[in-house]
Amino acid sequence: MNSVRFRISLLASLLISLTTFLVAEDKPSETVKVMAKDIELVVPKAWKQEKLEGPAARFRVAQFTINPAEGDKSPAELVVTQFGGGGGGVEENLKRWNGQIAGKDRKIKVTKGKSKLGEYYVFDGSGTYNKPDGPPFAQKFIPVEGQRMVVVMLNVEDSGSYFLKLTGSEKTVGDAATSLRMSFGAKAEDEKPHPGE
Protein backbone atom coordinates (compact mmCIF):
# COMPACT_ATOMS: atom_id res chain seq x y z
CA MET A 1 0.00 0.00 0.00
CA ASN A 2 2.78 2.41 0.92
CA SER A 3 4.47 1.61 -2.38
CA VAL A 4 1.35 2.63 -4.34
CA ARG A 5 1.00 5.86 -2.35
CA PHE A 6 4.67 6.65 -2.93
CA ARG A 7 4.29 6.12 -6.68
CA ILE A 8 1.17 8.30 -6.85
CA SER A 9 2.88 11.00 -4.80
CA LEU A 10 5.96 10.85 -7.05
CA LEU A 11 3.84 11.04 -10.21
CA ALA A 12 1.89 14.02 -8.82
CA SER A 13 5.15 15.84 -8.02
CA LEU A 14 6.47 15.22 -11.52
CA LEU A 15 3.25 16.54 -13.09
CA ILE A 16 3.35 19.69 -10.94
CA SER A 17 7.01 20.28 -11.85
CA LEU A 18 6.31 19.79 -15.56
CA THR A 19 3.29 22.12 -15.46
CA THR A 20 5.33 24.80 -13.65
CA PHE A 21 8.12 24.48 -16.24
CA LEU A 22 5.74 24.75 -19.21
CA VAL A 23 3.94 27.78 -17.71
CA ALA A 24 7.31 29.48 -17.08
CA GLU A 25 8.38 28.80 -20.69
CA ASP A 26 5.15 30.32 -22.07
CA LYS A 27 5.37 33.42 -19.86
CA PRO A 28 6.85 36.31 -21.85
CA SER A 29 9.71 38.27 -20.32
CA GLU A 30 8.68 41.45 -18.56
CA THR A 31 8.68 44.52 -20.78
CA VAL A 32 8.63 48.27 -20.32
CA LYS A 33 7.42 51.05 -22.62
CA VAL A 34 10.01 53.66 -23.55
CA MET A 35 9.61 56.86 -25.56
CA ALA A 36 12.29 57.45 -28.20
CA LYS A 37 11.43 60.94 -29.42
CA ASP A 38 8.05 60.47 -31.19
CA ILE A 39 7.80 56.68 -31.07
CA GLU A 40 7.04 54.24 -28.28
CA LEU A 41 9.17 51.11 -28.01
CA VAL A 42 8.35 48.07 -25.87
CA VAL A 43 11.63 46.54 -24.67
CA PRO A 44 12.57 43.85 -22.14
CA LYS A 45 12.81 45.23 -18.62
CA ALA A 46 16.28 43.66 -18.37
CA TRP A 47 17.62 46.04 -21.03
CA LYS A 48 19.28 48.88 -19.15
CA GLN A 49 18.40 52.30 -20.56
CA GLU A 50 21.40 54.60 -20.62
CA LYS A 51 21.36 58.33 -19.95
CA LEU A 52 22.04 60.38 -23.08
CA GLU A 53 24.45 63.28 -22.68
CA GLY A 54 27.19 65.13 -24.51
CA PRO A 55 27.65 65.32 -28.31
CA ALA A 56 26.37 61.74 -28.77
CA ALA A 57 22.92 62.85 -27.56
CA ARG A 58 22.45 65.18 -30.53
CA PHE A 59 20.82 62.52 -32.71
CA ARG A 60 20.50 59.62 -30.26
CA VAL A 61 16.98 59.35 -28.89
CA ALA A 62 17.46 56.17 -26.80
CA GLN A 63 20.27 53.81 -25.85
CA PHE A 64 20.31 50.44 -24.05
CA THR A 65 22.87 47.99 -22.69
CA ILE A 66 21.89 44.32 -23.04
CA ASN A 67 23.41 41.74 -20.71
CA PRO A 68 25.66 39.16 -22.39
CA ALA A 69 24.20 35.79 -23.28
CA GLU A 70 25.48 32.73 -21.44
CA GLY A 71 29.10 32.14 -22.46
CA ASP A 72 29.62 35.71 -23.72
CA LYS A 73 31.72 38.25 -21.82
CA SER A 74 30.61 41.61 -23.21
CA PRO A 75 27.15 43.19 -23.29
CA ALA A 76 25.45 44.25 -26.52
CA GLU A 77 24.35 47.80 -27.25
CA LEU A 78 21.19 49.15 -28.86
CA VAL A 79 21.31 52.74 -30.07
CA VAL A 80 18.23 54.47 -31.50
CA THR A 81 18.88 57.55 -33.65
CA GLN A 82 16.68 60.02 -35.49
CA PHE A 83 18.04 62.76 -37.73
CA GLY A 84 15.04 65.07 -37.92
CA GLY A 85 13.54 63.46 -41.02
CA GLY A 86 16.88 62.80 -42.74
CA GLY A 87 19.43 60.06 -42.40
CA GLY A 88 19.79 59.10 -46.05
CA GLY A 89 17.93 56.70 -48.29
CA VAL A 90 17.57 52.95 -47.95
CA GLU A 91 20.22 51.91 -50.48
CA GLU A 92 22.70 54.50 -49.22
CA ASN A 93 22.39 53.18 -45.65
CA LEU A 94 22.55 49.53 -46.72
CA LYS A 95 25.79 50.26 -48.56
CA ARG A 96 27.27 51.96 -45.47
CA TRP A 97 26.26 49.12 -43.13
CA ASN A 98 27.60 46.58 -45.62
CA GLY A 99 31.01 48.25 -45.29
CA GLN A 100 30.96 47.79 -41.51
CA ILE A 101 31.00 43.98 -41.73
CA ALA A 102 34.11 42.20 -43.05
CA GLY A 103 36.05 38.93 -42.73
CA LYS A 104 35.98 35.54 -44.40
CA ASP A 105 33.07 34.44 -42.15
CA ARG A 106 30.98 37.44 -43.22
CA LYS A 107 27.22 36.84 -43.64
CA ILE A 108 24.68 39.44 -44.73
CA LYS A 109 20.89 39.31 -44.90
CA VAL A 110 18.56 42.19 -45.81
CA THR A 111 14.79 42.05 -45.39
CA LYS A 112 11.86 44.46 -45.41
CA GLY A 113 8.52 44.48 -43.66
CA LYS A 114 5.65 46.52 -42.25
CA SER A 115 4.96 47.20 -38.61
CA LYS A 116 2.34 49.19 -36.74
CA LEU A 117 4.77 52.15 -36.83
CA GLY A 118 5.51 51.94 -40.55
CA GLU A 119 7.58 50.25 -43.24
CA TYR A 120 11.05 49.09 -42.23
CA TYR A 121 14.24 47.47 -43.54
CA VAL A 122 16.54 45.16 -41.58
CA PHE A 123 20.25 44.76 -42.23
CA ASP A 124 21.57 41.68 -40.42
CA GLY A 125 25.32 41.15 -40.72
CA SER A 126 27.79 38.95 -38.87
CA GLY A 127 31.56 38.51 -39.04
CA THR A 128 34.23 41.10 -38.22
CA TYR A 129 32.55 44.35 -37.17
CA ASN A 130 34.41 47.55 -38.03
CA LYS A 131 33.45 49.30 -34.81
CA PRO A 132 33.52 53.11 -35.10
CA ASP A 133 36.28 54.70 -33.03
CA GLY A 134 35.52 58.36 -32.39
CA PRO A 135 33.19 60.72 -34.26
CA PRO A 136 31.78 59.57 -37.65
CA PHE A 137 33.70 62.20 -39.63
CA ALA A 138 37.00 60.75 -38.34
CA GLN A 139 36.34 57.52 -40.28
CA LYS A 140 38.33 55.44 -37.75
CA PHE A 141 37.42 51.85 -36.93
CA ILE A 142 38.49 48.98 -34.68
CA PRO A 143 37.95 45.49 -36.23
CA VAL A 144 36.25 43.11 -33.77
CA GLU A 145 35.79 39.45 -34.76
CA GLY A 146 32.77 37.26 -33.95
CA GLN A 147 30.30 40.11 -33.93
CA ARG A 148 26.81 40.69 -35.26
CA MET A 149 25.07 43.91 -36.23
CA VAL A 150 21.32 44.19 -36.75
CA VAL A 151 20.17 47.60 -37.95
CA VAL A 152 16.56 48.59 -38.54
CA MET A 153 15.62 51.57 -40.68
CA LEU A 154 12.06 52.32 -39.55
CA ASN A 155 10.12 54.84 -41.66
CA VAL A 156 7.52 56.51 -39.46
CA GLU A 157 4.90 58.64 -41.18
CA ASP A 158 5.15 62.35 -40.23
CA SER A 159 8.31 61.66 -38.15
CA GLY A 160 10.90 60.48 -40.66
CA SER A 161 13.33 57.58 -40.32
CA TYR A 162 14.43 56.01 -37.05
CA PHE A 163 17.52 53.79 -36.94
CA LEU A 164 17.74 51.02 -34.34
CA LYS A 165 21.28 49.62 -34.30
CA LEU A 166 21.99 46.51 -32.22
CA THR A 167 25.66 45.46 -31.99
CA GLY A 168 27.64 42.95 -29.97
CA SER A 169 28.79 39.35 -29.97
CA GLU A 170 26.96 37.06 -32.37
CA LYS A 171 25.21 35.04 -29.64
CA THR A 172 24.07 37.99 -27.52
CA VAL A 173 22.74 39.91 -30.52
CA GLY A 174 21.09 36.74 -31.84
CA ASP A 175 19.28 36.29 -28.53
CA ALA A 176 18.11 39.94 -28.59
CA ALA A 177 17.08 40.17 -32.27
CA THR A 178 13.50 38.96 -31.71
CA SER A 179 12.98 41.45 -28.86
CA LEU A 180 14.38 44.19 -31.09
CA ARG A 181 11.70 43.50 -33.69
CA MET A 182 8.99 43.13 -31.05
CA SER A 183 9.94 46.55 -29.66
CA PHE A 184 8.24 48.24 -32.62
CA GLY A 185 5.66 45.54 -33.44
CA ALA A 186 7.48 43.55 -36.13
CA LYS A 187 8.03 39.82 -36.78
CA ALA A 188 10.85 38.23 -38.78
CA GLU A 189 8.49 35.65 -40.33
CA ASP A 190 6.45 38.44 -41.97
CA GLU A 191 9.46 39.98 -43.70
CA LYS A 192 10.43 39.62 -47.37
CA PRO A 193 13.96 39.50 -48.83
CA HIS A 194 15.22 42.84 -50.09
CA PRO A 195 17.38 42.97 -53.26
CA GLY A 196 20.01 44.98 -51.36
CA GLU A 197 21.10 41.71 -49.75
Image: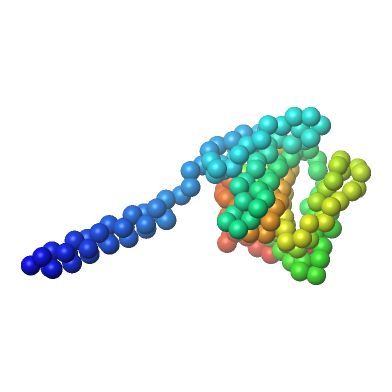
Work out whether residue 62 or residue 191 is closer to the camera in this orientation and state it.
62
Is residue 121 visible to us here?
no
Query: Quick one: which residue is furthest to the left in this view?
Result: 1
Is residue 179 visible to us here?
yes
Residue for point 22% across, 64% down: 11
Residue 3: where, in percent of width, then height?
13, 68
Residue for point 72% across, 45% down: 163
Residue 149: where, in percent of width, then height?
72, 55
Residue 86 is drawn in which quadrant? top right
Q: Is residue 33 left or right of residue 125?
A: left
Residue 172: where, in percent of width, then height?
63, 55
Looking at the image, is 161 positioned above or below residue 172?
Answer: above
Looking at the image, is 170 positioned above or below residue 37?
Answer: below
Query: Quick one: which residue is furthest to the front in this view?
Result: 2
Residue for point 25% across, 59% down: 13
Work out whether residue 88 or residue 67 is closer to the camera in this orientation and state it.
67
Work out whether residue 89 or residue 49 is closer to the camera in this orientation and state it.
49
Residue 69 is drawn in which quadrant? bottom right
In the rendered view of the protein, which quadrant contains the C terminus?
bottom right
Residue for point 39% across, 53% down: 24
